[in-house]
Image (cartoon, grey):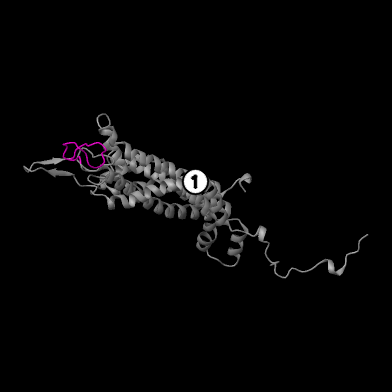
Amino acid sequence: MYTPQKDDFNFIAERNLDVDENFASQGYWKGVAVHFLRNKFAVTGVILVSIIIFFALFAPVVSSYNYDEIVSVTNSSGKEFIAKSLGPQIGASESQDFFADRTFLFGTDDMGRDLWTRTWQGARVSLIIAFVAILIDMIVGTSYGLISGYFGGLVDNALQRFIEIAGSIPTLVIISILAIFMEKGIGLVIASLLLTEWIGMSKIARAECLKLKEREYVLASRTLGAGNFHIIFKQILPNAIGPIITQVMFSIPVAIFTEAFLSFVGVGIVLPQCSIGSLIEAGFNNITILPYQILPPISVLALLMLGFNLIGDGFREALAPKLEDM
């Protein structure tokens, strides 16, 4: 039998023995980012939404026309011609048409306004309404759900009965009542979203709070004298943020679609302002004779909803990866 000798083993002075480089912890959020970026559908959703947001921000700024500008020309005899219901056209032409040298990538509407500019201006308005409404809903719904789940008992019972009453009222009834006291426009749309979209967020937050409030770190904080709201917003909320983010990603397309629906039925954005919904309504009214008018806004709406749903699915899988994805 071989007997080990003193010189058989040598220390590796250059190696850091405190950290195993092969299995070093990469952190929770870094792991989420890695899983998210590996998801091709989620990355596709990010690209779609980013492109639409880019055009919504910059296309109306660099466009040759304002979103509410009626494009017209005056001939040598002083007669004015309006570019009504022109199909998509690009640049100069040999035609004798007064607008042959103009560029209308999406054409013009029946009032003579450039649909390219109005489509991206409408996308900007719809995105602003959706993000503002969802931000406030996230704050209100998350706070409501966490407080309800944490205190439990009579507090939870009372708050949940209020949610059941609020959720039982049809959305159209709420919108109709608001329309009596408010003018049509962005304010009415945001108010409608604020009153209807926070309930789902509060249920997610409450469920997470009920699951987390009995954990050891919460008991330790309570034992050390931490206040209730410190525990709710400093201990429980950071550990429940994953499902809340996922819910936000799914709520944004719902808010965009709701805004489009409200504008489509005539209680949303008022002309000459525009949104995705108001443009779809205008295109729908002319769909039999000018079908090209409805294609740009409905395509932007479809791509926005598809993109945000792909992002939401990506976050859901990244925040709770399956064993085969690890």
Comparing 317 with 142, the one in front is 317
- Dot 1: few (<14), some (14–19), or many (≥20) neighbours within 10 Å? many
Going 46% across and 55% down the picture, which residue do you hit? 143
Q: Position of residue 41 (x, y in %)?
A: 50, 43
Left/right placement of residue 190 relative to residue 140 reads left
Going 25% across and 36% down the picture, which residue do you hit? 87
Q: Is residue 20 above or below residue 182?
A: below
Which quadrant of the structure image shows residue 13? Answer: bottom right
Identity of the amino acid at label 1? Ala
Residue lying at the far front of the rendered structure: 94
Comparing 249 with 293, the one in front is 293
Left/right placement of residue 222 relative to residue 289 reads right
Residue lying at the far left of the rendered structure: 77
Q: Position of residue 215 (x, y in %)?
A: 61, 56
Q: Callout 1: helix, strand or loop? A: helix
The residue labelled by disc 1 is 42
Going 84% across and 69% down the picture, which residue do you hit? 7
Left/right placement of residue 83 relative to residue 292 reads left
Answer whether residue 92 is magenta in the image. Answer: yes
Residue lying at the far top of the rendered structure: 288
Look at the image and tell me whether residue 209 can be seen: no
Q: What type of secondary structure mainly makes up the magenta span?
A: loop
Q: Position of residue 94 (x, y in %)?
A: 19, 37
Task: Read off the magenta span.
Answer: 83-100
Q: Position of residue 292 (x, y in %)?
A: 29, 34
Residue lying at the far right of the rendered structure: 1
